[in-house]
């Protein structure tokens, strides 16, 4: 079946890469696995051999029909993963989530998954290398931003290996990479997570501004200093824990705003 551009489809066909991904996931017979976008079933066949508890979600009805014919025993869901009801998802145990994610859905899907981490043991995704670098970026690097902070707030991020465009058909114009995300067991939490998210978004809304100017609607220079942040630096130099401290500081005020 031809790849459909509207679904951002690029089918993995390199057997060496497929085996390397399966080795990284290391599926066990007792695992509950949730695969997003199985495509032609490059990973599905091996995941199906490894565990009896496999659910796959596919948006393309033709591909879904093919998967159903090849693997009638698995739980197949035909759905747009961005519309999938994770609140109603009840795996028998914390699930292992796997997927080759198109660029246009990767960030919104990650943010949706972050809201249901109590049902997830780990996640292994194929993403554009650019996205993986942003997920794993450290402060003061050009890739560090909102996605880095929000992902690292929820998960331990581990970039595993890169995948060349030649491993896919049709070949994309970019390099991909496999990343592992593990929900943090004892994370440092913001008192008000909504406020924390708003602060991070505001900080990187205009990232060339100093943190003093980008967070002016939320807090004063004095409050920034109290949170251990130099008001004159740019947001990419502010660490995750400093953003948490800043959010916790202003959440103690009645409105979260300064005058």
Image (tube, rainbow, N blue to C red):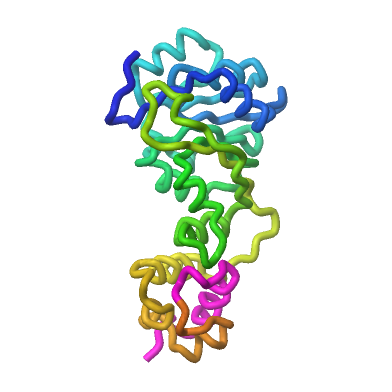
39 or 248: nearer the viewer = 39
The image shows residue 258, relative to residue 233, as above or below, that is below
Query: On the image, which quarter does residue 241 sit in?
Result: bottom right
Q: Nearer the viewer, residue 216 or 166?
A: 166
Q: Is residue 80 left or right of residue 132?
A: left
Judge whether 4 appears above or below 143 on screen: above
Q: Residue 257 location in percent, x, y? A: 40, 83
State which quadrant residue 217 falls in.
bottom left
The quarter of the rendered structure image containing the C terminus is bottom left
> Residue at the location (62% across, 40% down)?
160
Which residue is rendered at x = 63% and y = 52% of the image? 156
Q: Is residue 144 magenta?
A: no
Q: Is residue 73 above or below residue 133?
A: above
Furthest toward the top, the residue is 69
Is 236 covered by the magenta stretch?
yes
| Spot occupied by residue 162 in the image (x, y as percentages of width and height) | 55, 37
Please name the residue shown 41% across and 80% down the image.
Answer: 218
Residue 33 is left or right of residue 171, and the answer is: right
Rendering coords of residue 124 (x, y %): 58, 37
Which portion, as a residue range, is magenta?
Answer: 234-259
Image quadrant for the N terminus? top left
Which residue is at 52% across, 52% downward?
A: 135
- Please say if 50 is above or below 89: above
């Amino acid at each position: 079946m031809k790849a459909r551009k509207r679904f951002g489809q690029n089918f993995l066909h390199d057997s060496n890469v497929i085996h390397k991904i399966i080795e990284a996931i290391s599926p066990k017979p007792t695992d509950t696995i949730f695969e997003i976008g199985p495509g032609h079933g490059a990973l599905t066949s091996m995941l199906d051999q490894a565990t009896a508890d496999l659910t796959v979600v596919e948006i393309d009805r033709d591909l879904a029909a093919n998967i159903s014919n090849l693997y009638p025993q698995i739980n197949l869901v035909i759905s747009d993963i961005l519309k999938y009801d994770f609140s109603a998802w009840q795996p028998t145990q914390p699930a292992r989530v796997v997927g080759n994610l198109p660029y246009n859905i990767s960030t919104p899907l990650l943010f949706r998954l972050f809201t249901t981490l109590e049902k997830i043991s780990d996640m292994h995704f194929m993403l554009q290398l650019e996205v993986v670098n942003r997920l794993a970026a450290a402060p003061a690097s050009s890739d560090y931003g909102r996605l880095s902070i929000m992902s690292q707030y929820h998960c331990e991020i581990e970039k595993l290996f890169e995948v060349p465009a030649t491993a896919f058909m049709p070949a994309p114009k970019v390099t991909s990479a496999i990343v592992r995300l593990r929900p943090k067991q004892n994370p440092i939490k913001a008192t008000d997570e909504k406020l924390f998210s708003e602060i991070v978004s505001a900080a990187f809304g205009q990232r060339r501004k100093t943190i003093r100017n980008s967070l002016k609607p939320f807090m004063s220079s004095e409050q920034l200093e109290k949170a251990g942040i130099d008001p004159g630096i740019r947001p990419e130099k502010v660490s995750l824990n400093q953003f948490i401290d800043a959010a916790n500081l202003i959440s103690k005020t009645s409105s979260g705003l300064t005058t």
